[in-house]
């Protein structure tokens, strides 16, 4: 019996390897959120149903595939894995459980910049969050960083770069931003759209339409493009004339939801204008890099999440609804459940409350729910 890390599971997803997962959480938690991979199989048997022994499920577990036992925090999966080990089965358990899975970030290089430097995407595989680092000439900018700030600080150290700017494309409602904390630790400038910052309790640099920020000594521009709809302040970036960081406005297989501040009806027109007018003015060749993905099918071969803007205008259903009334119905009536504790997450990102780390972890548990399909 051995531990399998979230990083190891992520590599199996990226490489499309087979894995059989015995998930011992209760049925409701399993149905709400689980570890998904193209060649993953699942068996959900609640832990309490196995306390008297695992003999009855042995014939349901394959002997020709790796078996991973998963629970919420690790303890229950260790116990079940030990019972299976005693029954002669070779199994692993997920180190740190689903809490650790929710927090794992995998850096993936997306591409190069014209005058030197690179674009990196941090894939939060268990939560569907995507964040970014623009690296050039010894400097870096971060976009939509999560609260796992050590990952970005360690990355900058490994790359030998200084974090100079930290951006949030909008006030997040599904995860706690690490932007302010990173800015405080590094002396970087923290940028936030002012229309999302009416109630914030901290200093920030207003991110407004037309902002241009230099990273490094080369001509790498981050142009802010005001694209409201997911929030009233939602802002996109065109980086180096090549990459479109779309925040939570546009995803690969879906579009952003407008209701997380309770203003769906008010923001539908903004959402449509951003997607159907503002984005239409941009080059079809821009590579769209969103702040989230919704389903595992959106991952590319290398584990990154991206697609050309022109391809999305051709294939993304949310960009091809001619009738405005139908579009309004899609984004106001066809909504998934709201993210767990989204109001508390928004207040945390405003600086109104300061929950401890365990509360932050609990607030974020669950899948991405920022999209409408």
Image: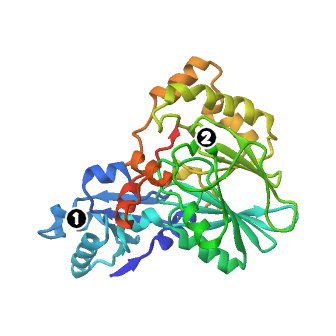
Q: Closer to the camera, 316 or 326?
A: 326
Is residue 323 shown above or below 43?
above
Q: Position of residue 314 (x, y in %)?
A: 71, 34
Q: Closer to the camera, 17 or 253?
A: 253
- The residue at which mark 1 appears reads as 57
| Mark 2 to mark 1 CA distance (whole Å) | 55 Å
Q: Which colour scheme appears in the figure?
A: rainbow
- Image quarter in which the N terminus is found: bottom left
Q: Residue at x 32, y 53 (%)?
A: 30
Q: Is residue 202 left or right of residue 347?
A: right
The reply to whether discs 2 and 1 touch (Cβ–Cβ < 8 Å) is no
Q: Residue at x 71, y 35 (%)?
A: 313
Specify whether residue 155 is in view. yes
2 or 1: mark nearer the eye: 2
Q: Secondary structure at mark 1?
A: helix
Q: Position of residue 41 (x, y in %)?
A: 40, 59
Is residue 71 shown above or below 344?
below
Q: Position of residue 68 (x, y in %)?
A: 36, 70
Is residue 99 shown above or below 290?
below
Q: Closer to the camera, 46 or 61?
A: 46
- The residue at which mark 2 appears reads as 195
């Amino acid at each position: 019996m051995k531990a399998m890390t979230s990083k190891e599971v992520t590599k199996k997803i990226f490489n499309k390897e087979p894995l059989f997962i015995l998930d011992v959480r209760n049925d409701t938690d399993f149905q709400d959120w689980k570890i998904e991979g193209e060649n993953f199989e699942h068996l959900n048997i609640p832990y309490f149903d196995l306390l008297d022994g695992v003999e009855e499920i042995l014939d349901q577990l394959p002997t020709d595939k790796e078996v991973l036992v998963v629970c919420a925090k690790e303890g229950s999966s260790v116990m079940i894995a030990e019972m299976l080990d005693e029954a002669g089965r070779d199994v692993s358990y997920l180190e740190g459980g689903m809490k650790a899975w929710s927090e794992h970030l995998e850096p993936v290089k997306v591409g190069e910049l014209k005058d030197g430097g690179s674009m990196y995407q941090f894939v939060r595989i268990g939560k569907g969050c995507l964040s970014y680092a623009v690296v050039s000439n010894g400097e870096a900018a971060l976009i939509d960083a999560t609260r796992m700030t050590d990952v970005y600080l360690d990355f900058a150290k490994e790359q030998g770069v200084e974090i100079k700017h930290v951006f949030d494309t909008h006030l997040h409602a599904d995860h706690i931003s690490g932007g302010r904390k990173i800015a405080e630790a590094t002396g970087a400038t923290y940028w936030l759209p002012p229309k999302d910052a009416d109630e914030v309790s901290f200093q920030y640099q207003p991110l407004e339409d037309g902002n241009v920020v230099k990273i490094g000594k080369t001509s790498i521009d981050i142009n802010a493009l005001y694209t409201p709809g997911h929030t009233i302040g939602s802002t996109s970036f065109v980086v180096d004339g090549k990459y479109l960081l779309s925040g939570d406005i546009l995803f690969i297989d879906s579009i952003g939801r407008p209701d997380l501040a309770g203003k769906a009806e008010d923001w539908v027109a903004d959402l449509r204008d951003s997607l159907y007018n503002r984005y239409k003015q941009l080059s079809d060749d821009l590579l769209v890099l969103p702040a989230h993905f919704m389903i595992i099918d959106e991952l590319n071969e290398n584990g990154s999440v991206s697609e050309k803007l022109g391809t999305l205008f051709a294939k993304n259903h949310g960009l091809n609804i001619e009738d405005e009334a139908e579009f309004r119905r899609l984004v106001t009536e066809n909504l998934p459940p709201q993210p767990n504790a989204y109001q508390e997450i928004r207040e945390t990102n405003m600086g109104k409350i300061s929950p401890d780390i365990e509360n932050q972890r609990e607030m974020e548990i669950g899948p991405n729910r920022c999209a409408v399909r």
